[in-house]
Amino acid sequence: MKIRAPAKLNLYLRVVGKREDGYHLLDTVMVPVSLYDELEIRRPRTRRRGKARLTVTCDHPLVPSGRGNLVYKAASRLLRSRKIGSPIDIHIRKRIPVGAGLGGGSSDAAAALVGVNRFFRLGLKRAEMLTLAASLGADVPFFVRCRAARVRGIGERLEAVAAMPRLWIVILYPKFPVSTRWVYENYPCKLTKDIGNTSINFSWKGPEEITSFLVNDLEAVAIRRYPLIGRLKRRLLEEGAAGALMSGSGSSVFGIFSTGQQARNVFQRLRSDERVEAFLVHTLS
Ligand code: ATP
């Protein structure tokens, strides 16, 4: 069985507080996009010796196979909670760049929960799945739901946002990862005024309205250390993007275009730029 795990982009990201345990509190709008990893779940071809019930492999050099992979944690927790003893193999084909602020690891974990649930017909209720997802990582519940959402706190406050039109987007990955931890450690303590209880009027009519609230508090920290991120953002704007922003804690940058044709043309031009890997995507509704 094959299952797709989409990437996400943050259209809006404010750091609104810091807990005593060091976790930053966020107010962010995330949207899934049509760039996917693929998970393949199957029964082992040969009989396995010993106790290994679950194997997880991945084709990307920066992503661990086995227990270090978030997919392993997700699948083993679900299998254990349902006392499933039959062995399975999960193989991950990475397409989403790693350490790019595109949420690949969290999305793979969510896809593992959804996939294993389907594979063994476990009939897990949505609420149970979301609880399990939250225990794996802040962004995992978002990927289980897989719809544009406003996410607050450390990821536990998830709220659907109004349906948005399909947006055409070019993502540029500068071929290096940025450590999420490093970005938060270097984020200056100055926080955005707490807007936790206010309702923000996100207007989704079209690309122009959406780009009017594009903001990412983490961008300046990342750009100071990696100026290429800033240059790529400028390049997208020069190419006619209605708006451009770094996603999450970086390193990737995206540009939103008014039409699919314009996005395609820009993608064709930028894909030959040796500094980047370029992706043409649209938002998923
Ligand atoms: P985020 O924006 O969610 O903080 P990111 O998109 O910048 O994260 P990921 O690509 O999710 O970063 O990977 C972050 C780290 O997680 C990497 O160091 C990677 O080795 C580890 N990791 C563990 N499992 C996975 C997986 N299935 N896919 C990708 N990375 C994984």
Image: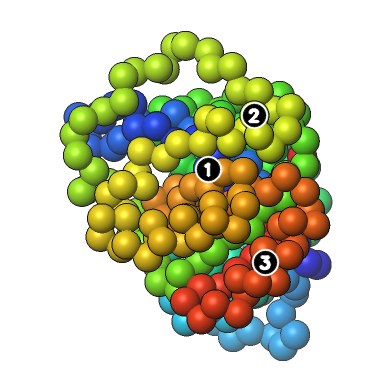
Which one is nearer the viewer's eye here, 74 or 87? 74
**Could you tell me how far apart the alpha carbons at marks 3 and 1 are, in whole angstroms?**
20 Å
Q: Secondary structure at mark 1?
A: strand
3 or 1: mark nearer the eye: 3
Q: Position of residue 140 (x, y in %)?
A: 55, 45
Q: Mark 1: which amino acid?
A: Asn
**Could you tell me how far apart the alpha carbons at marks 2 and 1 are, in whole angstroms?**
16 Å
Determine which of the numbered discs, if any, sits on residue 10 in the image: 1
Is 42 on the left-hand or right-hand side of 74? right
Q: Quadrant of the C terminus?
A: top right
**Could you tell me how far apart the alpha carbons at marks 3 and 2 are, in whole angstroms?**
22 Å
Q: Position of residue 44 (x, y in %)?
A: 71, 80
Name the residue located 20 percent from the left edge and 48 percent from the top edge. Answer: 186
Name the residue located 59 percent from the left edge and 86 percent from the top edge. Answer: 49
Q: Position of residue 215 (x, y in %)?
A: 45, 36
Residue labelled with disc 3: 267
Q: Which mark sits nearer the N-terminus, 3 or 2?
A: 2
Which one is nearer the viewer's eye here, 119 or 27? 27
In the rendered image of this protein, does residue 18 appear above or below residue 238? above
Which one is nearer the viewer's eye here, 74 or 189? 189
In the rendered image of this protein, does residue 218 appear above or below residue 227? above
Q: Mark 3: which amino acid?
A: Phe
**Residue situated furthest top in the rendering:** 198
Determine which of the numbered discs, if any, sits on residue 209 in the image: 2
Q: Residues within 10 Å of mark 3 (few under 14, many from 20)?
A: many
Q: Mark 2: which amino acid?
A: Glu
